[in-house]
Image (tube, rainbow, N blue to C red):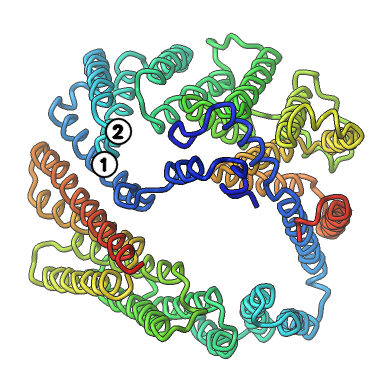
Amino acid sequence: MAAGVVPVEEGAALEQRVRRELPWAAWLNRGLLVLGVVLILSGIGYFFAHNWSHLTDNDKLALAAGAVLVALIGASRLGFDTFPGKVLLLAASALVGVFIAVYGIVYESTAETWTAFTFWALLIFPWVALGRFSALWIFWVGVLNVALFFYWQSIVPNWDFDPNSLPSERWGVVTLILLNVAALTGREVTARRRIAWLDHGWSALVLVAFVYFLSTAQVIAEIINSDGTDHSLWPTFLGTLIYAGLAALTYWLFVRVRPSLPALAIAILGICITLTALVGRVLFADVHGEPTGQLLLMGIVTLGIFGAGVWFLRMTGRDFAARRKAAS
Amino acid sequence: MTTLRNLFADAAPERLSAIEQALTVDETTHTPWYIQVLIVIGAWLASFFLLFFVFCLVGQSLLQDEHRDMLGVIGAVLLVATVALRRQVSGLFPAQCCLALSLAAQGMLLFGFIPDNAETFGWVTLLMSVIAAALYFLYPDFLHRTVTTLFAIQLSYWWICQDSIFGPSEFTLLTPGLRFLLLDLHFLATLAGILWCFLPSGWHELRRPLGYALVASLAIASVHPFVFGWFMDESSHLAAGAKVVYPWYIQIGPVITAAAFFIVTVWAAGGKPALVRYRPQWSVFVAFLGLFLFLQMSSVLLALTILLLGFALQNRPILGLGLVLFVFFLGHYYYALGLDLMEKACVLVLSGGLLLILRSRLAQLMPKEAA
């Protein structure tokens, strides 16, 4: 206990006291409320599932629209600035998607999937703007991502993660990355203008993680699938260059403008994995027989790459701590 | 809300500041969890390449049956060297490399000395249990202790249940009755081990990996439908309405679970004084436990035990595991009732309503802190 500052017996008594003073009533209250509501909602869901075939098309549409209206009325009654109100607004936005799906089933719509998602994003945009809720905004960005993904899937139906076989895949991923970089930039610009509702650290981390997931996967695909010909080397070179640009942008944003060590850690993880893949591609390029030496070298290089990444993060962390100390 | 200041309300100011100083995280030396994740990924990736390098160096001929002993010897030497190395180094990065090397050495040891057939499964279990017990004290690493102990406990489960994995074989020593009895004992020992590891105040640092390994092992085994057959069997027969009479060695599992839940609840409520003070309330609680057993919901009780333990210890991994198991077992319970959609809708709405009534009743009985 606290580096020997507190005696063992006193520590045990404190532990019991801490346990006694835990928010038991609140925990039980919330747990029973959530479980009770979930069970009742599941029961209502089962009730409609049982009677779905007996419902007319109008009933189905009215039910879906009614659920949106109930959530919306609930949100406005509770107030859009209260947490339950915001959660109900998020639920209403999600239920708009259910309404569009039911509409598509009832009228046997032949519209492509991406148009339905785009329409959904357009319909709920006013609520996103007025709701001032970062979770709703991230949800909206997610719907846009799905819409864009389905758009590219309508162009490239046989997505196989090999950019050389289907070059259009490359553009699909690039537009997805650009969409999320734009969302991140928008978030940072509004946060700098002190719009508090959007300035939650986790929303930036979600976007950074998604941008780095997409870009790292794409660059590794370019590196692994390049067969050494000019035809495949140029995209690899260009992709690596753009990735380096993204890394520089991340450094500028999360070291200079808005210090964030977790965001940097996500970027460093992606960069370390990409560098390891790049070194591996070079080392294992023309191996005949057992790659014994290459494996030893890969082990050492991997230690070096990740060691450098960790060292950089530790140094930056100390720099941030010193800056915070100086500011306070 | 308990704060450091109201916990030490009577402490002298200079003592309070010493405690606060001791508990303050030094930002310049502290490594945040996300950097630790990066270190772990790097160490495992590098170890993976280095192990493959060793593998290529010694050659694939060692994988042939006539040279397996040699691989076992290399594994034993590597294990001893890794233990010696780990006792010398302290950083997260070398520690993770040592962990990867040690696990690989144990794999080589098993592969080298034990032929892979059902006949020798008991020997694998015994060898791994001995190695895990020895390394628990020799290898000073939390994750290593948890992983090797978990592996040894899991092996002992599979050894008891090997008939349901490999099918009946001529090497089986256990009759079905003896198998269930051993399962009961294993279950009892696991639950008792969890209570021994977590309940005593100021629980010892050395017991923590064992405690986590036992909790994880209990979770793995309880979701495995063939191991703890009573969880799955008991509810799936409800729909038919048939009164299935199980032998006592199957019925004892739910009773052990209910007893464990009772012990954890009493401990969380403050121990023996709370038991004596609120005797009527405890009688109602025992009646509720009986209702759970009557409704054959012992698997839900098991999840609730882990959930309660996690909250009382303010331990997020155990709390999270308890939540996941709770959702899994509750979902399975309703699924296994085998009712049609309309009946299921009624049961769900009724049970949800009952919980909301219970909530409002509890809100009247308990202090106003819930608000």
Q: Is residue A250 left or right of residue A36?
A: left
Q: Nearer the viewer, residue B212 or B208?
A: B208
Name the chain letter of the residue that bears numbered label 2.
B
Considering only order in the chain, which callout, 2 or 1, is on the residue closer to the N terminus?
1
- Whole-percent x and y of residue A181? 34, 78
Q: Quarter of the image containing the C terminus of chain B?
A: bottom right
Residue B43 image label: 1
Q: Is residue B230 visible?
A: no
- The residue tagged with tag 1: helix, strand or loop? helix
- Whole-percent x and y of residue A162? 27, 65
Q: Is residue B199 visible?
A: yes
Up the image or down, A323 lies above or below B200; here it is below
Look at mark 2 in the image and give the residue it sits on: B100
- The residue tagged with tag 2: helix, strand or loop? helix
- Whole-percent x and y of residue B310? 61, 41
- Separation of residues labelled 1 and 2 (CA atoms): 8 Å
What kind of residue is marked 1?
Ala
Of all residues, the one furthest to the right in this rendering is B280
- Whole-percent x and y of residue A11? 57, 32
The residue drawn where x is 79% and y is 24% is B251
Q: Residue A34, located in which quarter of the rendered image?
A: bottom right
